[in-house]
């Protein structure tokens, strides 16, 4: 291999084709390529900035990859643990340039709406006697909205909850309320973490790895 | 985006434009999450969407008030599809479907019903009543893609001088719109109650 053909993927640690001089040159070339996106032409002031940016850019490249991996791992585990289901993936597919914050918007509405429903459910279950029709109506709503965003565990508890309402099982209802609050809290934390990761990725200049829309 | 800017940007915006080249879908659902979802789903197909939270508001939008068909707002003629939830407090999606199909002015508008309950009785009665399709929630992208085949082309408003676009019409035609009298809740075609009597905040 000649020096011209040698294209190191990292800083050159030297190979048969090169003299020490060539190794230093290759190392410099690699660093330049890492900077090419951030590189600006300009005066002395910008040279200084360039240096800072160049250090950050190299770090930035690594950060985005790490963040993306974290995001992918988080999403995968939430799907595997059935905290989220494929309906959530549908929401992600609906997000695009004309609707860049769609998932965040729908999920935020879900959080607000669910918090309201859970508060009202707590009040209803504190009454004596319990108005099971009203409780059931609230649980029905919560079941619907959790299903629409793919919050699978929340939805599953709602199904159980509705049965307890049908049977007018006070204790059962109390238990279900506790469970549904827990599951809601879990999915809320996880989704908020997901959104944080997404913001960091976008801020670092990366783009989100959303699933491709399926062809029908 | 906060909640109030969401409201003002979507279903609460004033209805002023009538030159709508793309299909206009009227979505009816009492769930704010589902309204947002349906909007998102429909907008990817480039439909213009008006989302309302009740069957009564849907009928108002279409120009039906107090059991009478008024001179219809041009909106009615620009609505190419109505998609409605089945289970809503007060007037259900089934009642709305019936009202639309009983109205000579509105019956040509295709109606699709959505529900979280996969009840054969419910499905059959909606299809019998004239619904194009019955979608099981949660609604997906593939469901919306199928809706394309139901979209009817826009019709022209009749020359009844309905230049006014907003506000109540002073003239109420004698012809009643089907089962809308008093806008009573009709009995459901199945024994399972649909949470009708419960108005949830």
Image (spheres, rainbow, N blue to C red):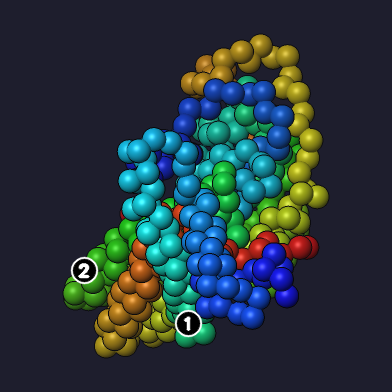
Q: Nearer the viewer, residue A192 or B72?
A: A192
Disc 1 crowd rating (10 Å Cα; few below 14, some 14-19, many 20+) is: few
- Number of marks present in the image shown: 2
Q: Nearer the viewer, mark 2 or mark 1?
A: 1
User: What residue would you read off at disc 2?
Assistant: A123
Q: Is residue B153 left or right of residue A76?
A: right
Disc 2 crowd rating (10 Å Cα; few below 14, some 14-19, many 20+) is: few
Q: Nearer the viewer, residue B83 or B101?
A: B83
- Residue A84: x and y in percent read 48, 75
User: What residue would you read off at disc 1?
Assistant: A77
Mark yes or no: residue A167 visible: yes
Q: Is residue B23 left or right of residue A128?
A: right
Q: Nearer the viewer, residue B170 or B57?
A: B57
- Residue A72: x and y in percent read 50, 74
Label 2 SS: helix
- Residue B69's place in the image compared with B97, above or below, is above
- Is there a contact, CB below 8 Å, between mark 2 and mark 1? no
Label 1 SS: helix
Query: Residue, x 41% and y 42% (percent of image)?
Result: B6
The label shown at residue A3 is none
- Residue A75's place in the image compared with B57, above or below, is below
- Residue B143's place in the image compared with B120, above or below, is above
Mark 2 or mark 1: which comes first in sequence? 1
Query: Residue, x 34% and y 77% (percent of image)?
Result: A186
The CA span between labels 2 and 1 is 34 Å
């Amino acid at each position: 291999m000649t020096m011209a053909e040698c294209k190191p993927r990292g800083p050159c640690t030297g190979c048969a084709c090169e003299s020490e001089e060539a190794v230093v040159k290759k190392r410099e070339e690699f660093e330049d390529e890492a900077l090419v996106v951030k590189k600006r032409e300009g005066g002395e002031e910008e040279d200084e900035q360039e240096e800072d940016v160049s250090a950050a850019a190299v770090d930035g490249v690594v950060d985005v990859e790490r963040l993306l991996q974290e995001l992918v791992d988080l999403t995968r585990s939430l799907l595997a643990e059935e905290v989220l289901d494929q309906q959530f993936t549908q929401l992600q597919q609906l997000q695009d340039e004309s609707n860049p914050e769609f998932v965040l918007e729908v999920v935020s509405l879900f959080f607000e709406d669910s918090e309201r429903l859970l508060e009202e459910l707590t009040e209803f279950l504190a009454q004596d006697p319990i108005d099971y029709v009203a409780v059931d109506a609230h649980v029905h709503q919560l079941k619907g909205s959790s299903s629409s965003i793919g919050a699978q565990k929340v939805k599953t508890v709602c199904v159980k909850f509705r049965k307890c309402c049908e049977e007018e099982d006070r204790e059962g209802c109390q238990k279900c309320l506790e469970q549904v609050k827990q599951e809601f809290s879990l999915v809320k934390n996880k989704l908020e973490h997901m959104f944080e990761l997404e913001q960091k990725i976008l801020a670092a200049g990366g783009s989100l790895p959303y699933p491709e829309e399926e062809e029908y | 985006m906060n909640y109030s800017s969401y409201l003002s940007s979507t279903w609460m915006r004033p209805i002023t434009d009538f030159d709508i080249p793309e299909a206009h879908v009227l979505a009816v659902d009492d769930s704010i999450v589902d309204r947002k979802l349906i909007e998102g789903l429909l907008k990817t197909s480039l439909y213009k969407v008006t989302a309302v939270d009740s069957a009564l508001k849907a009928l108002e939008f279409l120009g039906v008030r107090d059991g009478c068909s008024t001179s219809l707002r041009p909106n009615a003629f620009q609505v190419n599809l109505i998609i409605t939830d089945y289970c809503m407090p007060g007037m259900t999606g089934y009642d709305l479907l019936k009202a639309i199909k009983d109205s000579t002015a509105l019956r040509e508008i295709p109606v699709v019903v959505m529900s979280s309950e996969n009840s054969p009785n419910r499905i059959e009665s909606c299809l019998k009543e004239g619904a194009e399709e019955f979608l099981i929630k949660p609604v997906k992208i593939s469901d919306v893609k199928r809706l394309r085949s139901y979209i009817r082309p826009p019709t022209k408003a009749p020359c009844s001088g309905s230049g006014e676009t907003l506000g109540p019409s002073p003239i109420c035609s004698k012809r009643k719109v089907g089962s809308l009298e008093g806008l009573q809740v009709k009995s459901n075609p199945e024994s399972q109650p649909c949470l009708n009597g419960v108005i949830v905040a």
